[in-house]
Amino acid sequence: MPGETLRRLDVHSAGQAKEGHSDDEQNANRANATVSGVATPGPLQLDYRIPSEDEHRADFALVPIAIVAGSVVAYVGARKLWQTVFGNRTGIYEKKPKKAFVWKAKRQQSSPNELTFVVGENFKLQDSGANRTSEEWATLLDSIERSAAVVVDKMVEAQFGCIGKAITGSDFTDAASEGPFYLTNPSAQGHVCGGSNTGAAVIVAAGLADFALATDTIGGLRIPASCCGLISFRSTTGSISSEGIYGTSPSLDSVGFMTKSPTLLSRVGDVLGVPGKKNWKGDVVKIFLAKDMFESWLVEDDREMYVGLAKACLAWAGSELVQEVDLKDFLESHSTGWQYFAESGKNIFEALRGVSTAIAKHEAKHHPLDPSPPSADDEEEPLYRNAMAIKDAIRKNFKAGISEHKIVVFPALLQPAVHRTSEHMKHTLFYRQSQQMCALASLVGCPQINFPIRNRAGDLFSVGMVSLNKTDRQFLATAEKLIRMVEKQMKKLLSQPPQRGRITAAGSSVGKAPSTSAEPDRNREEQEAEGLKEAGNKAFKEEKFEEAVMAYTEAIRRMPKKPMYYSNRAMAFIKLVQFSNAERDCNLALALDSVNAKALLRRGVARKAMNNVAEAKADFEQVLAIEPNNAQARRELRDLLQFYRVQ
């Protein structure tokens, strides 16, 4: 072998070494000359080699590799042990809240009483460096002629200090977009922060700013604020100037803000110049609790949140002015054509999200700052027109239903924000549900306020409230008081031992709600009635109209104050050519809900069949007043004018 050094050592059986060898070598020879106590005859020759310098260097080169490999194995083992013992709950792989800043202002020393705020990346500021936080945002903001956002100028004039810009997702229709970083949620560590304006929410929740200005399309402001335990406000669409702000959907975009403290709501709102009176003093304000939406909260661990909320509403407005309502039933009864936008074809809130998304995506694709207008043969154009027609109908009917001086209360988060390490399907479901709770205000264009609430286990939820368009100022003043009252009621409830059993908001004191002891029976009757209604719908589709009538009748017997059941039975009577019965059922439905478009339409059809053309014409005209794009009402009215010569 090249470079190899060999050496031969002769050992004699008598244990004598050759001359010239040391004593140590002689001792070694003696030891090797005997095997198992038997003397070895003759000389024993041992050959060995001394490694070369190259081989020594190769051995030493393996040392750092072994150290790195050992470190990796140790890290993986420690990580698995940590996750096994503590779970993956701590958010240790997330960035600190201060990393949510993409630009910080160079500020002079300010007063300790000065309020500070941040803005989203889609706000244009005077400082040119603030508008170039990323190549994408720089391009978008360059398309805006104005040098700075109007609302930011108003804040600065009010002596509020803008301290920077926060990470903002560029797709405002995608609530799950959280920008380039995963940020620690200061209010629910390890859980998602909500996407879109997530950077602003994290900064305010961490106490790095007093409030944040942001835009909202389908929850881009409200969802991250709810996930981070903040109060958020979405203004009436178009009521606050959006000059100097890059938005995506003129029909849905709204300017708003988020904060920790309810005491800042009116103060910031006044500087923004929100519409409305200073307060509702002297007006009778009615509160509608959408109990059907709170169904998931009426369980063992979460029911106290609904109780605390209802008690606060009762303490503020009084028992005569707080009423439990079925919001889902109201929306389904006052709109048509929405089923196309619901994946399941049944959930109205899923449909509202679908309608909002269709509008937002179309308008983002054909942005007003885009020099290329929509083409005439655009495949999405019919879908967009259909979505806009449903939006207009929902807006008109909702405004007619709640009218002035009314507030509708519902859950803004049906469940706590999911953990960041949850399955992808859970993330998707959470964001979709959250956007469903935001879509109504986006379509109606009304103001919405969300505020945090926690259950006994400390899980973070959120409550939403909407009011009539352009009542923002008095709505904010009311929310300041109501939120503090809810906090007080929840503190009192959670300091007491948990109550067992299923309960209502506050017994029979909320509207006409039944007593606590009757609640299980009422819930069972509601479930049975819904099951019978579905059975009737199935029979109707199979053209078994008599069976459908029987099923609807049983549903009415259990829940006689549901206008939808009468309206459905009326349609079955029409198919059975029993027009007088159909007219009677429509009258009963309209007695419960005077602006029920379906009941009016079906009564008009029945009256037309009975040759009561003048009354039928009045019904069809009333339907079109509620839903201007109702195709069947237009067709029926046109037939009356052409064939019956009705004036």
Image (cartoon, rainbow, N blue to C red):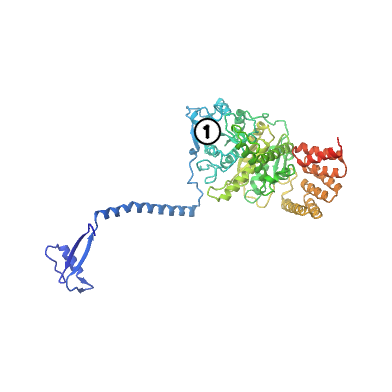
Q: Relative to residue 302, is residue 18 drawn left or right?
A: left
Count every numbered label the image shows and give the total. 1
x and y percent of residue 421 in the render? 53, 49
Farthest residue, direction top: 157
Farthest residue, direction left: 19
Q: Residue at x 56, y 50 (%)?
A: 424
Q: Residue at x 23, y 73 (%)?
A: 36
Is the N terminus in the top left, top right, bottom left or bottom right quadrant? Answer: bottom left
Q: Relative to residue 66, is residue 93 drawn left or right?
A: right
- Displayed quadrant of residue 640: top right
Query: Of residues 460 and 622, which is closer to you in this image?
Result: 622
Instruction: Report whether residue 411 is seen.
Output: no
Query: Of residues 345 and 634, which is closer to you in this image?
Result: 634
x and y percent of residue 121 in the render? 53, 34
Q: Tell me the crowding category of disc 1: few under 14, some 14 to 19, or many 20 or more residues within 10 angstroms, Cα based.
A: few
Q: Relative to residue 577, is residue 7 drawn left or right?
A: left
Farthest residue, direction front: 377
**What residue type is disc 1 on?**
Thr
- Displayed quadrant of residue 628: top right
x and y percent of residue 258 in the render? 58, 36
Query: Of residues 462 and 422, which is closer to you in this image?
Result: 422
Task: Give above or below for 491 relative to 82.
Answer: above
x and y percent of residue 608 in the render? 85, 43
Residue where numbered disc 1 is placed:
139
Instruction: Determine whether the residue tagged by mark 1 lies in a helix, strand or loop.
Output: helix
Instruction: Report whether residue 443 is seen.
Output: yes
Is the C terminus in the top left, top right, bottom left or bottom right quadrant? Answer: top right
Query: Of residues 447 and 392, which is closer to you in this image?
Result: 392
Q: Residue at x 80, y 37 (%)?
A: 621
